[in-house]
Every structure is written in structure tokens, then in C-alpha cells.
Image: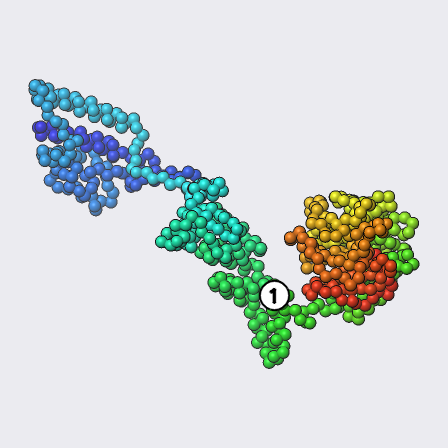
Amino acid sequence: MSGSRKEFDVKQILKIRWRWFGHQASSPNSAVDSQQGEFWNRGQTGANGGRKFLDPCSLQLPLASIGYRRSSQLDFQNSPSWPMASTSEVPAFEFTTEDCGGAHWLDRPEVDDGTSEEENESDSSSCRTSNSSQTLSSCHTMEPCSSDEFFQALNHAEQTFKKMENYLRHKQLCDVILVAGDRRIPAHRLVLSSVSDYFAAMFTNDVREARQEEIKMEDVEPNSLWSLIQYAYTGRLELKEDNIECLLSTACLLQLSQVVEACCKFLMKQLHPSNCLGIRSFADAQGCTDLHKVAHNYTMFLADMENNALFRDDIECQKLIMEAMKYHLLPERRPMLQSPRTKPRKSTVGTLFAVGGMDSTKGATSIEKYDLRTNMWTPVANMNGRRLQFGVAVLDDKLYVVGGRDGLKTLNTVECYNPKTKTWSVMPPMSTHRHGLGVAVLEGPMYAVGGHDGWSYLNTVERWDPQARQWNFVATMSTPRSTVGVAVLSGKLYAVGGRDGSSCLKSVECFDPHTNKWTLCAQMSKRRGGVGVTTWNGLLYAIGGHDAPASNLTSRLSDCVERYDPKTDMWTAVASMSISRDAVGVCLLGDKLYAVGGYDGQTYLNTVEAYDPQTNEWTQVAPLCLGRAGACVVTVKL
């Protein structure tokens, strides 16, 4: 092959290479940013905003490495920029056969087909021109090329974890099951290991758990573990007062540092004199130094008091301070810290009032009050008229006497007694005449429940609005109830037992003022009409009553007492009273339940006994001035 032919081939090849690789970028910035991802190029930007691309001459490499040789190398190392090369600036290069051996694409094989060299040269030139034109034409019609591009999906991790969460929800592709208590939680080892150092160490080392399909999590609360597994997939976690301690202890075990930090900050916001010592102890047990420090500083005021000169040298005073501090700051231990000093002062527990009832004169109008300090009953006032089977409730430290019967007719009237001024006032009447009703106050309003209107047993309920000063009906009970026991517990109104006209009831239902619905609860073990009802420490007590109307020869009066726990929806029998009491008045005073008066089948009783829930024992206290059954008994803070 002649030298001119080599020179032509080199020039032609370089033209093609520069047309392919020496163009400008399509825009000053090749990077493209969108919601889906980012693009960017590796080239350098020129002064005109385009992109300069390196031709072979701009590299500090022997040109022989790309198939041709020249006398010296081009050195642009000290140049401020790498200029574009043009075909006119490219010198002619001399190639040898050895040079072309490493670049076969530069060679055109010579074929002896009987034609002359000129014809071959013409054909070759024509062929090269045709091929070059085709290549250049295709390059000319293409969009401007750029260097390598990279794409990054900005929401790739989010979309991936959403799919993983969906797999978790449908229990797909799960390769491990975590067992906590009686709960089995499927999950993916890869996700758990990427979030938790605890699981990463477990699954990436040669330990027994790494090969097990089921892993038992000892001493881990199941709901907290499930919440943290969901957090591993979603990055979201709900912190509440009732789950924060379990979440924090489980997060410490699983080495979830971000969750531990969030839980500690949550507990810092919850610090209070009633829980600061408990939180400090809990933080110390979990190794949460920041939380422990904050909780400790919160309690430092007590330490300052210990150094006060007034208390420092008085040993007895220091003991009293420590006793009071433990009692008030550790509410969960109060049952174990009971002493004469922990009982409420008698002047702060209120005064017990016994209002009206049936006596030997067939209708008492008197009101007595019980003084806990002197253990004595004293008459204080009289109602304006005779009332039997009425209801009484305390609202704003005043006694509201509602409904009843006067011996001739059923009443719908309401009166209010102020113990401080010892005066009576008339209130707006109920919409319905009622006797044998139950009355209680729930979240401000007063409720009149069931009863008898003189013709039929009632399942209707009215509510007194003290702001609007009017009565309104609310949802009706599922069963008509007269001589019903009514009490308030945990934001709900309970209607217990009573009579429906044919028999005494053992059914119980509760009213939710927020949904305006009654819901049936577990039944008592015995039928009870004329039952006394009160509450203490989250429990509902049903005391005394009768199991059938008096006309029934098998009717029996009851001395039995049972207790209802709304958490378990179960009734449990407790210690019985010393005697049977029907139509007994029941109320809580201090930390004891008082059963006042009643009827034992022969006598209207004036005896009173008190029940201590902590010892499960009944004791006799001072008797009433007047024996009475069906007295309404309430506590008023004076």
C-alpha cells in the first residue's frame, strides 16, 4: 500500500473519529434532574458552554498505541484548556505494517483479482467514500452524542421499602419468624439486619440463630416487637405513655439508636414529680445516660431540701421526708407503703349524708350527716315534702333530690339543697314522672335512669344540663329497670340489676355519653332489686338487695356483695355483710364503702357497717338516728 494511500486513510479515519467524538454537548449542563432521577456526564465544559471531548492527540500517550506513529507526542498538560482539533491541523503520519498490525480496522486487505492497481485504487476510494459517506450521514442525522451518563432514582429506597412492607403485610418471601410470647411475627432477615445491629450480628455470624427459621425473643413484649418490626420497614413509630417503656427497653435490646433517642426525648417531656424517680431508675437500668441525667436533675430540688439547715440535723424529720417522698413519687408501690400517716385526713374526705327513706312512719323527710372524726350521725335538715323511692346526686357540692313518690302519685319534681347555706331551691322538673329511679353525675350533667311512672316500668333516660338548665332524653336502655342501682365508673354510667315488672334482674349495662349508646356487660351472679351500688379504685360494687318481688313466697333478701372489674368484664364475690339488707344506701367515704340502713325483712334498720376493700372485711360503725330503708346516701365535700 502506497504512502499516499496511508496518508489518505489516516486523514479519513481521523475525520470520522473527530466527527464522532469531537462535537459539542447539546446544552451547557447535561445533568437532568426530575422527580424520577438525575443524569450527568463525565466530560468537561468549554468556555462557550459546550463540552470539549478529547481526541487521541490530547492524551499523553504514544500515538502508536492507537495505530499510528509520529515523531513526538503532543503535550497539553500545561494548557489552560484542551482545544478542539481540526483536520487541517493534523499532520501526515507515516504507518508501517507493524503499526497497522495492532489496528486492523485501519487496514484494507489487498486482493489480487486481476485488476490494475489504479482500478483497485479507484474502487477502494469509491468504496471508502461510500462507506464514509454512509457513516457520516448516519452520524449527522443522530442527536448530538455525549459522554457516559448516570441515572439515580431519588425515591428508589422509598419505593423499595414500600414493596418490602407489602411483602411483610402479605407474608411473602419472609425467611425468618420472630416468636415473642404467643405471637409469631414473620420478617425478612435482610431488612432486619439493615436496620438493627442486633439482628445484623445475629444473621451474619456463625451462630445457631443464623440457621434457624424461628427465633424466640425472650423477655420481649410482643406488641412492642411488632411495632419496631413495622418501623424497620416504614421508618414510622407511634409513641404513647402506655407503650413507651416497653418500646424503649425493646429498642435498647435491638440496638435501634434512633428509636432509643426518640423514646428518651418523649420521656423527658413526661417528667413529673410523681414519676421522676421511676423514670430515673428506668433510664439507669436501660443505660440511657442522657435521660438519666435529665431525670436526676429534675429531682435535685429534693436533694437541696435534704441539705437545708431546718432538716439536716433532725433525724426524725429526715425519715418523714423520705417516707413522704417515696409515697408520692412511687404510686405503684403505695399499697406496700400504707401507714397511719398515709390515710387521708378525716376533714378532707367529705361528709356522708343520708336523705329520706322509708321509716316506721311510712316516709322520712329528715336528712342526717355522719362525722368521721366523731363517728356520730347528726340531723341537719328536712325535705320540703314526703318522698319515697327517689334519687339523689351531688352537683357543685349541692344535693339534688329527683323524682320519687309522695304516697299518692309519682313525682317529676326536683329540689336542690345547699349544705353550706342550709337552704332549698326548686329546679326545673323532669320530662317524665319517675319513682324507683337511679341518679348519678357523669362528666358534668346529671342522669335520671329508668324507674316507674305509676303505670309501667321505664327504660328511658333523661339528662340534666346545668348550663342550659333543662332536661333532655338520651338513648334508652335495653331493659326497663325500676329500683335500679346506678354508678359512674371510668367515664361510663352503669345501670345494675333492678326489676322489669316480672322479675328481678341480674343484667348490667353501661352508657357511653360520647357515643350515646348502652352496652350490655357481664351479668351478676345473683338477681338483685333494691341493690346498693358504688365504686372504688376502678371497681364496681353491688351490695345487698332482694332476688324476687315481695309477692313471691320464695323471695329472699341478700347480704351478698360482688365486685365488677370492667377490664376483665367479670364479677367476683367478696366478703358478705353481717346481715341482709334490702333497699340499702351505699356510698364511698374515704377509702371505705358504707352500707347504711335498709330492710332485713322485719325491721327498718338504723345500723351501718363499713367495708375495707384492702382487708376484705366489714366493721360496724355508729348507727343512724332513725331506722330507714331506701335512704339515698351521698358524700359532700364541705
Residue 299: give x, y in percent of width and height. 56, 67
Label 1: which residue? 333
Percent position of residue 258, x then y: 46, 54
Left or right of 362: which side holds 556? Answer: left
Location of the C terminus by quadrant is bottom right
SS at mark 1? Answer: helix
The quadrant in which residue 30 appears is top left
Please indicate whether residue 276 sits to the left or right of residue 288 in the image. right
Q: Percent from the top left, x then y, of residue 242? A: 58, 55
Eyeballing the image, is 232 above or below 591? above
Q: In this view, does 463 lie to the left or right of 34?
A: right
The relative height of residue 576 versus residue 409 in the rendered view (above or below) is below
At x 84% / y 63%, what residue is drawn?
606
Task: Name the residue furthest front.
Answer: 554
Q: Between 456 and 313, which is closer to the camera in this rendering?
A: 456
What residue do we see at 72% from left, 52% from top? Answer: 525
Tell me the quarter of the image containing the N terminus.
Answer: top left
Q: Is residue 259 visible?
A: yes
